[in-house]
């Protein structure tokens, strides 16, 4: 493991179990090193072995990874509390609540079923910071192994399932006590993932009639033709059941998308606008500001600004959104993908929490969802993904830079151009927004061609 950049990506460690970096020996070493580092920083609580929470999504490879991690934690003198199948945000919520040393989620979120991943949360329930990740990588590269001294007794503690009930109670408590969902018909698509055992029951408990999809996971069907990546099934079901709304989650349930009663999709941008305006009307939108990433739609920015809400723009990634919210003390921020943070209730994105807050805003205002969807007009947008073999820094490509600037000038303030490499795949992402679809399609093609020619990768179009 001399090449230590290969371990942590933009969201934990991802890969195909049994292949690097998800090899059993690497996983148990990472678990031991993390536990040792976090123990060294934590104030000693003197009450037995420190606890580490662990949860997984519904992938077939999950239980074995959980076992390997549990053994690694034990070798560093820590005990795991296994929550079983539970959403990523459940771990973010329960880690500080149960005064655990750390929380770990075994999930590859929206990736196909053959992938898996490991995400670490520190004792405050926030994702592990890049500095600690680098330290773990350095220790691993040195071949450091924590001395094996497992605690006496079982490696994992019982009672994880009852802790998940505490998370469900928390979610219910975020829904206004004066409102309920009675008389509402909802389609709820759980992506054959982590929310399947929780979400339908949660909405039913609040009085909704629920038509559940994607709730029969078999270890191989997570995110397959369902959930936030493939919302078409949910949209069709809304029309079929004459539902008032449809909600779909991704595999680990940290984000959600909606469909209105006409089956039209409502993405994260529109959901943020809806909740931000609702909070503003109640005088609860702190700083009258919202955090969006650079990939959010230009129409969303314009809509918020025209209603007196300013936008803090950050690079893509939920970590950047969280940072900006914390730094400025704001109430809400998120991504077009449906990853939204409602800071009053939680420090990280939570699909079920987002769904509840959206439904509360809709319920309180008494308008159908389609009325909210029409309130802001999305600017036409093209996102072109270009396969790349190398990722030379864009700063060092003068012709591509000049081309980007020329396209941006051509939009004359009525749109924007944004070019970046994907953090998780071998892709260059080109986004162009502007008033005319043919013009922005042409620009996106020009930018892709120009980039490929300048970098000598035109063969791989």
Image (cartoon, rainbow, N blue to C red):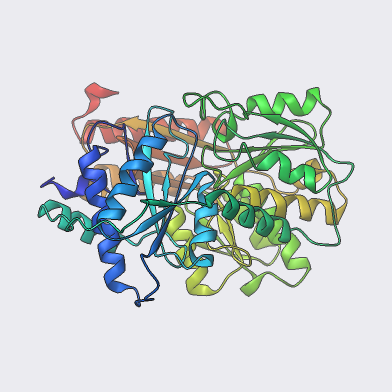
- Residue 444 lies, with reference to residue 165, above or below; the image says above
x, y percent for residue 428 = 33, 37
Relative side of 396 to 60, left or right: left
Which residue is at the far front? Answer: 153
x, y percent for residue 337 = 54, 43
Can residue 377 be seen at all in this image of the molecule? yes
Relative side of 228 to 188, left or right: left
x, y percent for residue 365 = 85, 55
Is 40 or 336 nearer to us in this picture?
Answer: 40
Relative side of 23 to 192, left or right: left
Location of the C terminus by quadrant is: top left
Relative side of 306 to 384, left or right: right
Name the residue located 90 percent from the left edge and 41 percent from the top edge.
183
- Residue 409 lies, with reference to residue 460, above or below; the image says below
Is 268 or 311 nearer to us in this picture?
Answer: 268
Q: Quadrant of residue 323?
A: bottom left
Is 388 or 379 nearer to us in this picture?
Answer: 388
Can residue 412 be seen at all in this image of the molecule? no
Is 85 or 294 nearer to us in this picture?
Answer: 85
- Residue 391 lies, with reference to residue 299, above or below; the image says above
x, y percent for residue 81 = 45, 53
Location of the N terminus by quadrant is: top left
Question: How many discs mark residues in the rendered view?
Answer: 0
């Amino acid at each position: 493991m001399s090449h230590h950049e290969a371990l942590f990506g933009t969201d934990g460690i991802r890969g195909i179990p049994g292949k690097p970096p998800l090899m059993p020996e690497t996983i148990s070493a990472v678990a031991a090193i993390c536990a040792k580092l976090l123990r060294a920083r934590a104030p000693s609580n003197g009450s037995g072995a420190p606890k580490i929470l662990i949860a997984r999504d519904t992938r077939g490879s999950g239980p074995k990874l959980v076992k390997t991690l549990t053994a690694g934690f034990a070798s560093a003198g820590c005990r795991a509390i296994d929550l079983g199948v539970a959403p990523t945000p459940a771990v973010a919520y329960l880690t500080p609540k149960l005064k655990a040393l750390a929380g770990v989620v075994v999930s590859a979120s929206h990736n196909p079923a053959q992938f898996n991943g490991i995400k670490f949360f520190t004792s405050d329930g926030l994702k592990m910071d890049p500095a600690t990740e680098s330290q773990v990588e350095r220790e691993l590269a040195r071949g450091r192994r924590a001395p094996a001294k497992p605690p006496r007794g079982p490696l994992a503690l019982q009672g994880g399932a009852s802790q998940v009930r505490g998370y469900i109670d928390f979610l219910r408590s975020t829904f206004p006590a004066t409102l309920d969902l009675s008389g509402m018909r909802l389609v709820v698509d759980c992506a054959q993932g982590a929310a399947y055992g929780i979400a339908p029951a949660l909405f039913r408990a609040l009085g909704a009639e629920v038509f559940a999809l994607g709730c029969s996971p078999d270890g191989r069907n997570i995110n397959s033709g369902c959930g936030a990546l493939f919302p078409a099934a949910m949209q069709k079901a809304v029309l079929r059941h004459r539902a008032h709304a449809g909600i779909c989650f991704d595999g680990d349930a940290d984000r959600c998308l909606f469909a209105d009663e006409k089956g039209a999709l409502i993405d994260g941008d529109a959901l943020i606008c809806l909740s931000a305006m609702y909070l503003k009307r109640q005088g609860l939108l702190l700083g009258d500001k919202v955090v969006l990433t650079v990939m959010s739609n230009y129409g969303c920015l314009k809509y918020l600004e025209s209603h007196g809400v300013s936008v803090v723009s950050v690079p893509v990634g939920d970590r950047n959104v969280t940072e900006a919210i914390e730094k400025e003390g704001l109430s809400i921020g998120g991504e077009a993908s449906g990853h939204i943070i409602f800071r009053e209730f939680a420090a990280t994105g939570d699909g079920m929490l987002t769904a509840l807050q959206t439904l509360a805003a809709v319920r309180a205002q008494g308008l159908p969802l389609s009325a909210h969807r029409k309130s802001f007009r999305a600017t036409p947008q093209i996102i072109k993904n270009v396969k790349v073999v190398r990722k030379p820094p864009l700063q060092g490509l003068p012709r591509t830079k000049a081309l980007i600037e020329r396209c941006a000038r051509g939009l004359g303030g009525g749109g924007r151009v944004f070019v970046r490499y994907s953090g998780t795949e071998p892709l260059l992402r080109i986004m162009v927004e502007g008033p005319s679809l043919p013009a922005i399609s042409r620009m996106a093609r020009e930018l892709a061609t120009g980039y490929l020619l300048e970098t000598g990768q035109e063969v791989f179009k």
